[in-house]
Every structure is written in C-alpha cells, then in structure tokens.
Image (tube, helix red, strand yellow):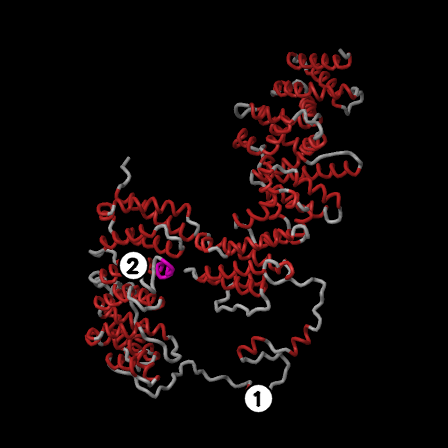
C-alpha cells in the first residue's frame, strides 16, 4: 500500500476519533487545523496527491462528523467563536459539490426546529452568498468527460433546482428570505452566468469545457415554472455579450442544444417571452429549429396552434426569428400554409375560442409581412383556396366579432397574396383590434431611410378624407380667409327647429294602414308611420279591430324613403300593437316565424318585438304610461312635453317660500298592478318552441340558420324569465329544459350561450319547490351538462354562464335543504 495514501487515511481516522470523543477545545482546534492542510490555503499545505485523495474519499466523512458534533456546548469550547469559524470554513472552502450535498442532507435529516437546523440553514445561506453555487456548477462542467458519477450529477441537479421547495418544507415558518423562489432563482441565474464566463475563458485558453450541466439546471428550473426569474437574469446579460462575440453565440447555442428534450419546450417558451426581438432570439438560438425536431415542433406547432396565451410582441419575435435566416424561411412558408388551413377550417371556427382565433389571425398577418412575393408565388393557389374557405366560414358565424375578424383578415391577405386581382372590401365598424391587425401586416420602414419629398407631396396631394367627405381641410393658423368679416358673428341655434311638412298626419289607425299600404305621397306615408304608435295607444279598441292586419302590414313594411329611424319606428309601432291585443297578434307572429318565404331578418324581427312586448306587458303600472304616451298627439312638439305649466311654476314658488319642520321622502312608491303577461305567456312561448326541429325549404334552424336559433334560445329564456310567479311557469320550464337538452351539444357558440341563459331563466322563474317536485330528472341532467360546460367549453362566456347556472342550482339546494342546527 502506498505510504502517502495510508498516512492520509490514518490522519483522517485519528481526527474523526478526536472529534467524536474529545471535549478539549484546544485539542479539537488543533486537529481541525491539521486537517485544513488537505484543503490548501495554509502555510504548510499537503501534497497534491494527498489533497486529491482527501477530497475524493474522506472530505464528506469529515463534514458529516462536523455536522454530528454541532451543538451550542460544542461551539462554546473555545471563546470568541473561534471554533465555529473554523468549523464553517470546511463547508465554505472545501469541494463545493460535497459541501452542498452534506448541508442539504443534514437539513433534510433534522426532525424539527432546533439549534442545529437554524445553524445549518444560515451556513447554507452564507454558502450561497459567497458564490459557492457557481463552484458547484463549474465543477460539473469541468468533469463532463468523467462519466463515472452520473448519479452524483443527477442528485446535484435535483438538490440545486429543488432547494427552495426542500428548504421551505424543512424550515416552515422559520424559512430564510435567501431561500424564497423569487430570490433564489435570480441568484442561480447570476451563478450560471459566472459559470458561462468561466467556460468562455477556458475555451479561449485552449481548455476543453462543457455547458451540459448548466443546460440541465436551466431546463429543470424552467420546468418548475421559474422561467421569468432565471431567464430574466440570463437573457439581458447574454443579449449584450453575444452582440459582437461569435464565441459567446456558440456557447449560447450549445447551452440550449444541451437542454434535455423533456425541458426544451419550457426553455424555448421562456426565451421567446424574454427575448426583446427576433434578432436577439436568433443570436441566442442559432439554427436550433433545423437541428432539433423537438425544437421545430415547439416553435412551429405548439406555440402557434396549441397555445394562444402569448402576446403580440412574442409572436413577432417567434415568426421574425424564422424569417431572419435563409435556412429557416421555408419553415415560415410552411407555417403560413398551416395557419391559413386552420383559419379556413369550419370546425376550428366553431370550436375554438375567440382569443385563439385572434391569435392565429395575427400570426397569419405577421407571416405575410415577412414573406416576399417570390416566396408566395408557388403556394398562391393553395393559400387562396384556404382563404376563400375561411372567409365563408367566418361570414357564416353567428358572432359579430368572428365575422368582423374574417373581413379584416380577408381584406389584408387577399391584397397581399393576389395584388393584381380585384381587392376584397367589406363594410364593418373599425375597432382597436382591426387597426392593430392592419398594422401587423404593414412592413415597417427602415429607420435610416429618409422620407424624400414627404412634405411636398403632402402639400400637393389632397387628403383622402377631404375627397371622401367633401369637407375642406382646416386652414392652419395665420392663413387669410375670405370670410374674416364674419368671424365675430355667433351662429344661430337651430337645434330645436322642426322640418315643415306639407302633409298632415292621419288621425285614425285605419287611415295609417291605408297610408302605409297604398299612399304614393311619401311625406304622408312618413307622417303615418310616425303617428302610428301614439294612435295605437290612444285608440286601443279601434286597434283591436284591425290588430292582426296592422301587424301584417308592419311586418312586411319596407323603407321607401330615407326616413330617419325607420327601423325603430316600425319596431315600436309593432310592439304597441302586440301590447294592445297580445293574444291574437302574438299568435299570428309566432305562426309566421315558421312560415315559408320570410327572410332571416324578418324572423329575427318577430323575436325582437315579441321580447319587447313581453317586457312591456310584465311591467307594473304599464297602463298609466301607455295612456300618457297616447295622449300626446302626433303634432305635439317635444318642447311642449317638457315645458312647465303655470300650475307647476306656482307650486315651485310656494315650495321654495314655505318653511316646513319635517319632510317625508320625496320619492314616490312604484306603481303597482297585475302582471298582464301572465294570461298571455303561452301565446308567446309555446308556438315558438314547438317547431324548431322542422326544417323548411328556406329555413333550417338545425342547419345553416344557427344565428336565428341562438336568438330563439335567448328569446325563450327572456320569456321564461318574464313569466316568473305565473301559473304557466312550470310547463314552460319543463318544455324549455327539454329544448335545451335536445340542443346541448350544438357546435355554435352563440347557440350554447342562449341555451345556458335559458337554463338560468328556468332556475330563476320556476319556484324552487315546483322545480324539485315536477322536474327532478331534468335538473339532474342539466346539472351534469352544466358541470361539463363549465370545465370544457372553449368559449369563456359559455363557461361563465354555466358556472352561474351551477351556483343557482346550489342556492336552490341550500334553500330547500337548510343546514342542520348545531
């Protein structure tokens, strides 16, 4: 046996025996000082081979012995903390990986709060503050060629990344701030940067080194959900270092390439979120998507199609990264094809939530901004086919936001893919989202390219808004005007003026019918339409004689002149007719809803007026308001209705000059009265719900007319809600739950919203006792469906409505089954 090695072993055995049995502080101190020879840094260090044997075979045993002797009595064997300082130096100066593992082992082995636990925790905090974690990581980077200790590396990896969780479990309420995740992972990022700097220095010096262990630490930290903490430190530093250094770029590429596949998605997601732009992302990743199938799947599939929570700048960084290199640009064309294929899928439009459709649309426009015409040439037919299919799917949607989205994307994409053809142009209201999407497809001008002749062209070319609207542009200040002499005159207020009509308004309902059907005098026609609502309320008996005929005229009435507010006038008049003769008119309109040769607009008008009429009939004090509305003649000006009479003026003066010692509440009690909708609710409700599953030649609610089906579900829900406390509420609720159950799996979002609203209306309108007595099976079926909708429906509004309905069910159960008294 080698005498040098045996002497180290004998020395260690004697030291362990002394530390375990001696109570002499001086002797223990001298023993520890002799052992420090093997750590170096003393006046008489041991030979290199002795230090290597001590570090490899005996250092962990010495540390465990020191941990076992830790106690207040043992540390006080020498005054002024001399023994404690020497004891701590073994953990802070020896091999960092072994010291770290022994510290973690000791902390996890303590049963509960104690002096030893807190002392070891503070020592570990000092270990971290002195940069020893960098020594742990660097040691593994320099030992990558030695494959004899894979278990040690795996153990170190788990302990390093899981330190906050492990220390939190050990220390509980006594945990130190250094071990909080928000503090620890930024420190781990700083230590990783020190290791990368050491790796770069070694490579410059000609020494081989690896970043594999740092990659594993980075991957595991990102899998734990700590991308922002650790990459928030790494990315800004690496962004600056890779700016002008090819060596640093290569190190970054290897850092990401060595991340295990199971953690690559988390790392790439964090990098795309943290990188300030595509140029930085390209320097950090290189051509990783061309080397790794996993990275290509994450970057071109998962972040674009399977997730949609990321911001627009992140999308721009991701797609800009694919566009920055000639090897990666074919992937961008492939991504555009797949995005447009998804955008044009009717199933995707129906079943994906609106935020995801916005996300995919933005990605399409960003791709188009980066691609050139020559790159789109080979795929033009395929892209146009997907675009046209997508336009049809979006325009068929029952959601206005989806239709507007389809119009915006179709205009931009068609102009880009097929610039020589006729441009698509739709009419829709501009909003913030549409403006943002148009800006995404506009190539940004280079920062250093001056705008030549900008002011001169602007001066010679008239503004587009001026040409479209005919309004002259505002002259800048200081320009002379031809009408300077008129500037000091104040314009006369003509806001209250009324247009003079040569024709008088009809005074009878029958005259209005005749005017609306046969009159060629358009002023008289308009006057009849404006006077009709007041005449109906003023002459209810005369209206009932011709109510069905009048409803038919109004339902088929078309705007023959440019009447301001035509739709509102027609709707209010039709509502007044229904309110005046609810049973007969409602029966007629509900029969016409399923009749042939009606447009979808007319059918939706029927639903709207039935809803408004039901609301009016269910309001208390309706007759007083109706008489007041009908008493105002058609010729009465608006100013007459609000002008105070002499009696009101006198009363106001008396009130101001009268002193009162007490005054009651000035508010009037709400007008009371019977619910007039009670007796006619069945005429409104049951005919509408009976024929929804019978397709007609031009009308199929279960087919393409899902917009009307959704409006029908909402209307039935409103009618159910307005029938609260009525005798017909229970059969209405049963019929409505059967209607909901038949359509509960409908693919259209708008229809599902209407169904969920209808269920809530049933729960709010039918008395709780009758619900559980008459509809127990329907409630059980509805509960299971609502729970499934609240968890799995792709639309957020549907999930919210389902959750509200579930809460109503819980309140219903609590109301009928109160908690037992304690």
Q: The C terminus appears in which quarter of the rendering?
A: top left
Question: Marks 2 and 1, how far apart in space?
Answer: 73 Å
Sequence-wise, the earlier of marks 2 and 1 is 1
Q: Nearer the viewer, mark 2 or mark 1?
A: 2
Q: Position of residue 27 (x, y in %)?
A: 71, 14
Which residue is labeled 1 in the image? Answer: 485
Left or right: 330 as drawn, with respect to 358: right
Q: Which portion, as a residue range, is magenta?
A: 703-710
- Label 1 Cα neighbours within 10 Å, binned few <14 / some 14-19 / many ≥20: few
Q: Which residue is mark 2?
A: 694
State left or right for residue 541 relative to residue 132.
left
Residue 623 x/y as whole percent: 23, 69
Whether the magenta-drawn stretch holds residue 330 is answered as: no
Q: Is residue 687 above or below residue 90?
A: below
Tell me the quadrant of the picture where the N terminus can be found: top right
- Look at 37% across and 55% down and name the residue there: 753
Of helix, strand and loop, which one carries label 2? loop
**Secondary structure category for the residue under label 1:** helix
Would you say the magenta stretch is mainly helix, strand or loop? helix
């Amino acid at each position: 046996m080698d005498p040098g090695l045996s002497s180290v072993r004998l020395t260690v055995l004697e030291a362990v025996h002394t530390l375990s049995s001696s109570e002499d502080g001086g002797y223990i101190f001298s023993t520890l000082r002799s052992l420090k020879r093997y750590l170096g840094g003393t006046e008489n260090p041991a030979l290199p081979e002795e230090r290597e044997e001590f570090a490899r075979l005996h250092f962990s045993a010495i540390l465990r012995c020191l941990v076992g002797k830790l106690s207040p009595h043992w540390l006080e064997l020498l005054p002024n903390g001399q023994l404690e300082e020497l004891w701590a130096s073994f953990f802070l100066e020896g091999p960092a990986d072994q010291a770290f593992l022994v510290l973690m082992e000791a902390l996890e082995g303590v049963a509960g709060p104690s002096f030893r636990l807190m002392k070891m925790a503070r020592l570990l905090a000092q270990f971290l503050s002195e940069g020893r974690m960098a020594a742990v990581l660097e040691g593994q980077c320099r030992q990558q060629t030695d494959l004899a200790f894979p278990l040690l590396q795996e153990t170190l990896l788990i302990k390093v990344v899981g330190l906050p969780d492990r220390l939190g479990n050990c220390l509980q309420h006594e945990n130190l701030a250094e071990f909080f995740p928000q503090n620890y992972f930024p420190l781990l990022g700083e230590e990783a940067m020190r290791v990368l700097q050491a790796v770069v220095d070694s490579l410059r010096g000609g020494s081989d080194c690896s970043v594999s262990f740092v990659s594993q630490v980075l991957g595991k930290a990102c899998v734990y959900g700590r991308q922002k903490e650790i990459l928030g430190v790494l990315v800004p530093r690496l962004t600056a270092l890779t700016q002008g250094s090819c060596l640093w770029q290569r190190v970054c590429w290897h850092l990401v390439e060595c991340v295990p596949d199971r953690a690559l998605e988390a790392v790439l997601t964090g990098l795309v979120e943290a990188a300030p732009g595509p140029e930085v992302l390209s320097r950090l990743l290189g051509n990783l998507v061309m080397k790794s199938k996993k990275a290509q799947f994450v970057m071109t599939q998962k972040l674009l199609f399977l997730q949609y929570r990321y911001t627009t700048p992140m999308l721009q960084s991701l797609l800009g990264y694919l566009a920055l290199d000639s090897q990666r640009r074919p992937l961008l064309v492939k991504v555009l094809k797949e995005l447009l294929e998804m955008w044009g899928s009717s199933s995707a439009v129906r079943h994906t939530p609106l935020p995801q459709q916005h996300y995919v649309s933005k990605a399409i426009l960003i791709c188009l901004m980066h691609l050139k015409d020559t790159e789109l040439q080979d795929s033009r037919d395929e892209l146009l086919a997907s675009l046209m299919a997508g336009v049809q799917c979006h325009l068929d949607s029952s959601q206005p936001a989806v239709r507007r989205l389809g119009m915006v994307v179709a205009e931009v994409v068609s102009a880009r893919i097929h610039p020589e053809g006729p441009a698509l142009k739709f009419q829709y209201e501009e909003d913030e989202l549409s403006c943002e999407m148009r800006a995404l497809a506009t190539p940004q001008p280079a920062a250093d390219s001056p705008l030549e002749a900008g002011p001169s062209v602007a001066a010679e070319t008239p503004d587009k808004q001026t040409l479209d609207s005919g309004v002259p542009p505002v002259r800048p200040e200081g320009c002379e005007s031809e009408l300077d002499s008129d500037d000091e005159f104040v314009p006369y207020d003509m806001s209250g003026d009324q247009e003079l009509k040569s024709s008088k308004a009809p005074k009878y309902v029958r005259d209005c019918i005749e005017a609306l059907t046969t009159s060629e005098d358009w002023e008289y026609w308009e006057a009849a339409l404006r006077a009709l609502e007041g005449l109906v309320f003023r002459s209810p008996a005369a209206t009932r004689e011709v109510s069905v005929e009048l409803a038919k005229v109004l339902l088929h009435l078309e705007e023959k002149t440019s009447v301001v507010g035509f739709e509102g006038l027609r709707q209010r008049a039709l509502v007044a007719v229904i309110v005046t003769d609810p049973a007969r008119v409602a029966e007629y309109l509900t029969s016409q809803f399923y009749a042939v040769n009606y447009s979808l607009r007319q059918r939706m008008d029927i639903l709207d007026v039935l809803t408004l009429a039901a609301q009016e009939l269910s309001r208390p004090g309706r007759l007083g308001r109706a008489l007041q509305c009908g008493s105002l003649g058609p010729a009465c000006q608006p100013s007459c209705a609000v002008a105070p009479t002499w009696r009101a003026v006198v009363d106001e003066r008396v009130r101001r000059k009268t002193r009162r010692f007490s005054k009651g509440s000035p508010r009037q009690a709400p007008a009371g009265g019977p619910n007039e909708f009670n007796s006619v609710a069945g005429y409104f409700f049951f005919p509408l719900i009976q024929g929804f599953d019978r397709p007609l030649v031009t009308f199929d609610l279960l087919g393409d007319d899902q917009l009307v089906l959704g409006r029908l579900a909402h209307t039935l829900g409103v009618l159910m809600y307005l029938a609260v406390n009525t005798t017909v509420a229970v059969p209405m609720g049963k019929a409505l739950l059967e209607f909901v159950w038949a359509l509960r799996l409908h693919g259209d979002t708008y229809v599902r919203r209407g169904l969920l609203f209808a269920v809530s209306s049933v729960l709010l309108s039918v008395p709780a006792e009758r619900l559980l007595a008459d509809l127990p099976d329907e409630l059980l079926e509805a509960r299971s469906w609502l729970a499934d909708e609240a968890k799995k429906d792709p639309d957020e509004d549907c999930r919210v409505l389902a959750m509200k309905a579930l809460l109503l069910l819980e309140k219903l159960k609590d109301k009928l089954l109160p908690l037992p008294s304690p």
